[in-house]
Image (cartoon, helix red, strand yellow):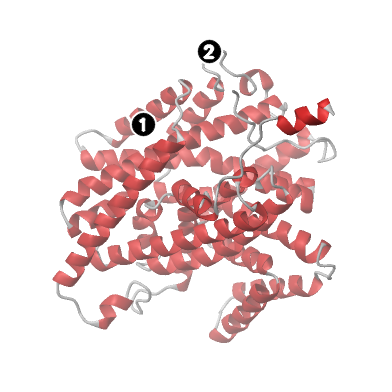
């Protein structure tokens, strides 16, 4: 009895997070200003159809969020694509998914250094971009070595500040749009569809980049043990967060496109939104620029320590050389070697690639993980628990992909492919999510494909060697718990 009493009196996590708490957390993680950093890249790549690309990406992410939410039910204490795919499909396929996650972790701090350096160079053009890149790379690394952490309260305050800036932008955007002449109804529909600039391949290519605005929603699954009714609320919060961010993002860029039409080039595509804000109201140039600089600074620091912790977990499990990657600084309790390693890689990349290519390369890995999670949800809920045969929906997936990738496409083929996709959405949503993510992945630029393919080939070869042809213990891609 004493043992039972002791067990029942042990402290436990409180299930205090409501559905709206979870949605707020998701919005904070993704950030309400998420589409602003990538606005110029999307406009250039999609020939001005930024709103359309974000809405298409939202549909793909809603299906994927649904799959993440359902998988969080099955694995409430382990919320990663690596776990879901490895356990539901095959450990080797899970390894490939995990390796794609490593690519994301390594690229995230890199693109944050690039964006912060570009924006700082806009503010102070007398200081070369290279000097700003070295500065931000050094600051990210130095602060992470010190073990500095941002509390949840500070994150909430930052999100509130970003929300205030977004509201301020909407107010002055409306004043600018309705205070200046325009050419009638076509002016308001052009951001969705401009017949003079429409190019389906370009729009799909830009949509592949637009996925970046949604990355982070899967973090909600890590709160399963602290949420009220987690089997219901984690799923709802994940889907609703994607929907809220998608609509908010679409409205933000819609206003931006009305202020700065696609026919007018930007002084700097990487920091285009700050120029849009400055046109709406000149002081907004500095306000929005500073807000985005702070947002990317925080994201860059968090991404670097996240990558360092992932490498530490791989070093601790002897997947990487343990003497370098598997050690923690005794004084600061951080994986110092890994922080320096990730910082060096990120800084080197900031001199080699631009923000747009970095975002595409990051999405190359992210879309692989999203496809994996959708397949894992399909096999768990539609094959094993559903008791049905998977052949028919898988055949539909194959036909949709075949029809859409055939040369000399025409409206009839696209119509049949669309009907097949609608059938999947109504019958097996995870396969619809997989198919849409596949098309976005396929439409990434050839440069992203080359670099991403090399990365995946190296990873598969390394995994095969490390596990003797995937027969031994697989490499662990889970983030280790933080030390007390």
Residue under the image location 33 percent in, 48 percent down: 162
The x and y percentages for residue 444 are 52, 58
Q: Nearer the viewer, residue 9 or 99?
A: 9
Q: In the picture, residue 111 is in which quadrant?
A: top left
> In this picture, is 68 found above or below 412?
above
- Mark 1 crowd level (few <14, some 14–19, many ≥20, 10 Å Cα): many
Residue behind mark 2: 331
Residue under the image location 30 percent in, 36 percent down: 129
Residue under the image location 32 percent in, 38 percent down: 117
- Mark 2 crowd level (few <14, some 14–19, many ≥20, 10 Å Cα): few
Q: Nearer the viewer, mark 1 or mark 2?
A: 2
Residue behind mark 1: 136
Q: Nearer the viewer, residue 240 or 312?
A: 240
Report the label total.
Answer: 2
Q: Quadrant of the N terminus?
A: top right
Q: In the picture, residue 350 is in which quadrant?
A: top left
Residue closest to the far bottom: 412
Give left or right: position of 180 versus 346. left
Q: In the picture, residue 308 is in which quadrant?
A: top right
Q: Nearer the viewer, residue 369 or 380?
A: 380
The x and y percentages for residue 375 are 71, 59
Helix, strand or loop status at disc 2:
loop
Question: Which comes sooner in the sequence, label 1 or label 2?
Answer: 1
Residue 100 is at least partly visible in this image: yes
> In this picture, is 3 found above or below 467?
above
Residue closest to the far top: 331
The x and y percentages for residue 353 are 43, 43
Q: Quadrant of the C terminus?
A: top right
Q: CA distance from mark 1 to mark 2?
A: 24 Å
The x and y percentages for residue 238 are 56, 56
Helix, strand or loop status at disc 1:
helix
């Amino acid at each position: 009895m004493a043992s039972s009493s002791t067990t029942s009196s042990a402290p436990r996590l409180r299930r205090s997070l409501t559905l709206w708490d979870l949605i707020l957390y998701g919005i904070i993680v993704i950030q309400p200003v998420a589409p602003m950093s990538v606005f110029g890249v999307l406009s250039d790549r999609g020939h001005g159809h930024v709103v359309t690309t974000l809405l298409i990406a939202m549909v793909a992410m809603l299906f994927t969020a649904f799959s993440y939410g359902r998988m969080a039910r099955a694995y409430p204490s382990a919320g990663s694509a690596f776990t879901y795919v490895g356990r539901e499909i095959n450990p080797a396929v899970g390894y490939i998914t995990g390796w794609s996650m490593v690519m994301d972790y390594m690229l995230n701090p890199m693109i944050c250094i690039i964006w912060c350096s570009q924006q700082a160079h806009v503010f102070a053009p007398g200081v070369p971009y290279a000097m700003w890149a070295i500065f931000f790379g050094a600051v990210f690394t130095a602060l992470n070595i010190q073990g500095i952490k941002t509390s949840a309260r500070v994150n909430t305050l930052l999100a509130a500040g970003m929300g205030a800036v977004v509201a301020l932008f909407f107010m002055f955007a409306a004043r600018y749009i309705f205070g200046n002449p325009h050419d009638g109804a076509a002016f308001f529909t052009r951001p969705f569809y401009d017949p003079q600039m429409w190019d389906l391949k370009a729009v799909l290519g830009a949509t592949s980049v637009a996925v970046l605005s949604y990355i982070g929603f899967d973090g909600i699954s890590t709160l399963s043990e602290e949420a009220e009714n987690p089997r219901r609320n984690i799923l709802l919060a994940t889907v609703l967060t994607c929907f809220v961010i998608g609509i908010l993002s679409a409205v933000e860029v819609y206003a931006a496109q009305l202020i700065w039409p696609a026919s007018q080039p930007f002084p700097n595509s990487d920091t285009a939104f700050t120029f849009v804000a400055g046109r709406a109201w000149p002081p907004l140039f500095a306000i929005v620029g500073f807000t985005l600089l702070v947002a990317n600074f925080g994201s860059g620091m968090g991404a670097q320590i996240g990558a360092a912790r992932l490498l530490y977990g791989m070093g601790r499990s002897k997947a990487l050389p343990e003497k370098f990657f598997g050690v923690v600084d005794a004084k600061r309790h951080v994986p110092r070697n890994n922080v320096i390693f990730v910082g060096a890689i990120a800084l080197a990349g900031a001199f080699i690639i631009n923000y747009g290519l970095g975002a595409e390369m990051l999405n190359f890995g992210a879309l692989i993980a999203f496809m994996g999670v959708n397949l894992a949800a399909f096999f768990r809920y539609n094959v094993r628990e559903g008791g049905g045969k998977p052949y028919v929906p898988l055949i539909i997936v194959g036909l949709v992909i075949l029809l859409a990738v055939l040369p000399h496409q025409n409206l009839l083929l696209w119509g049949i492919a669309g009907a097949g996709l609608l059938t999947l959405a109504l019958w097996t949503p995870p396969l619809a999510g997989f198919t849409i993510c596949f098309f976005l992945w396929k439409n990434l630029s050839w440069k992203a494909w080359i670099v991403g393919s090399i990365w995946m080939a190296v990873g598969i070869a390394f995994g095969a060697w490390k596990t003797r042809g995937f027969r031994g213990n697989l490499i662990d891609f889970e983030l280790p718990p933080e030390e007390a």
